Image: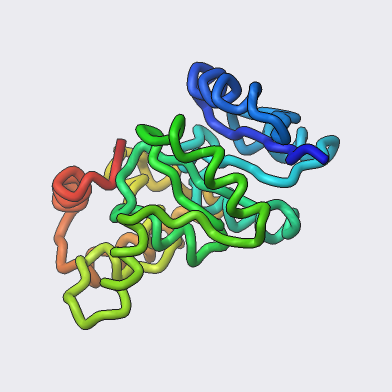
Amino acid sequence: MATNVFLVDDHELMREGLKIVLKNHQGIAVVGEAGSFDETVTKLKKAEVDVLVLDLSLPDKSGLEVLKYLRQEHPDIKILVLSMHPEERFALRVLRAGALGYINKQSAAHDLITAIERVMNGGRYLSAQMTDLLITEHSNEKTLPHQQLTDREFEILRMIAMGDPASIIADKLTLSVNTINTYRARILEKMNLKSNAEIIRYALEHSLID
């Protein structure tokens, strides 16, 4: 029986490239694709999916929010996160949120099939870099300021850094503007920052935004 794979990425060319990688592999079938969160929600109602490959950067919903939604509404689907960011930026967060693997887009052509096969066999896909990260996490090494943030705070940090005003962030996360401002205050306090400009500088220095 074929493994049914669903692709979620807002770049059509990326989806086409992934389909080329997968289409000639025996035992894997691409049964659907989407370019946004809303499209994903609609199409998953009609598709039988074993593995979902999820891009973290979607236009209408933050990647971690999408991941948490999928884990809640479709707990049987195995999720592999695909991102242009190196493992040290997001891998640990997505694993904690329920993903079974994290693949850098630059290595997707080489790693995707291996990752799909591994999660279908009951495992997780961990690159050598991710294994090192997990070891480091359990050591006493000092963590970076943004690693102390909750997932929601981290997503709001990224949105602020990308220039989204509080009203847009509130709309995307279905929260009030006052709540977003409260989160912003917590972020500034936890990271010892003083302004949005410092948030932007920090995010750029640590490659937290595209």
Image quadrant in which you'd find residue 93:
bottom left
Q: Quadrant of the C terminus?
A: top left
**Of residues 159 and 180, which is closer to you in this image?**
159
Side (left or right) of 175 relative to 207: right
Q: Is residue 26 visible?
A: yes
Q: How many marks?
A: 0
Side (left or right) of 186 relative to 155: left
Q: Quadrant of the N terminus?
A: top right
Q: Is residue 74 above or below residue 53?
A: below
Residue at 14% x, 52% y: name it. Answer: 198
The residue lying furthest to the bottom in this view is 140
Image quadrant in which you'd find residue 191:
bottom left
Image quadrant in which you'd find residue 136:
bottom left
Residue at 60% x, 45% y: name it. Answer: 116
Q: Is residue 194 above or below residue 28?
A: below
Residue at 76% x, 35% y: name it. Answer: 42
Side (left or right) of 144 relative to 76: left
**Of residues 57 and 132, which is closer to you in this image?**
132
Side (left or right) of 127 relative to 35: left
> Residue 62 placed where, x, y %?
49, 46
Q: Is residue 140 above or below residue 45?
A: below
Residue at 31% x, 72% y: name it. Answer: 135
